[in-house]
Image (cartoon, rainbow, N blue to C red):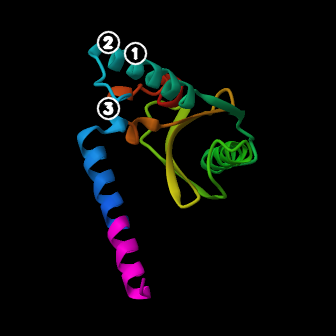
Amino acid sequence: MPLWLRWFLSLTAAAGVVTALVIVVGRNPLGDQGATTPSAAGAAVANREGQIVTAQDQAPHHAVLPQSLPARVALERAIAADMRNLVATNDLAGPVQAVTCKQLASRNATSVAFRCDARADNFSYPFAGVADLSTHKLTWCKNDSVAVDPGLQVPLNRACTR
């Protein structure tokens, strides 16, 4: 048998096998055996579990407000330390690049509210924070409401938004 004929027969056989596989998979897709449409009850359970995880991620963190630092600087440093810890425990990709806070309008004379932005691995993480000037306490929360599905949103703890 000449070489060109062997090549022709091999390529024809391979094309036939590929065509047969495409036809078989198209008629009986194996990937659909495990796929189901989620029920309303299943979606509600999944959303509730997602809300629990979001609430845990947004839990308030606390630190002492040193008298030697302005509240904004102290909060930026506290959030940066928190972010470095999240990177060290592989909860976030790093490195931590910067944390910046902007003071919001004060509602009372004893506390100052801030909106902060922490950047790690070129991704921005929003935070809300409060400096209680009377107790020298900082409180901050990661704000996941911007990034998650509306069904998973959880309001921020009041301690972070006073």
Examine the image and state in which quarter residue 17 appears.
Answer: bottom left
Residues marked 1 and 2 touching at CB (< 8 Å): yes
Circle 1 residue: 45
Residues marked 3 and 1 touching at CB (< 8 Å): no
Q: Closer to the N terminus: mark 3 or mark 2?
A: 2
Tag 1: Cα neighbours inside 10 Å, few (<14), some, or many (≥20)?
A: few
Residues marked 3 and 2 touching at CB (< 8 Å): no
Query: Circle 2 sits in a helix, a strand or a loop, which is it?
Result: helix
Q: Amino acid at mark 1?
A: Val
Could you say which disc has been placed on residue 150 in the image? 3
Q: Which residue range is magenta in the image?
A: 1-13
Pinpoint residue 54: horizontal percent, then vertical percent.
49, 28
Q: Closer to the N terminus: mark 3 or mark 1?
A: 1
Looking at the image, can residue 110 be seen?
no
Q: Amino acid at mark 3?
A: Pro
Pinpoint residue 113: horizontal percent, then vertical percent.
50, 38
Q: Residue at x 23, y 41 (%)?
A: 27
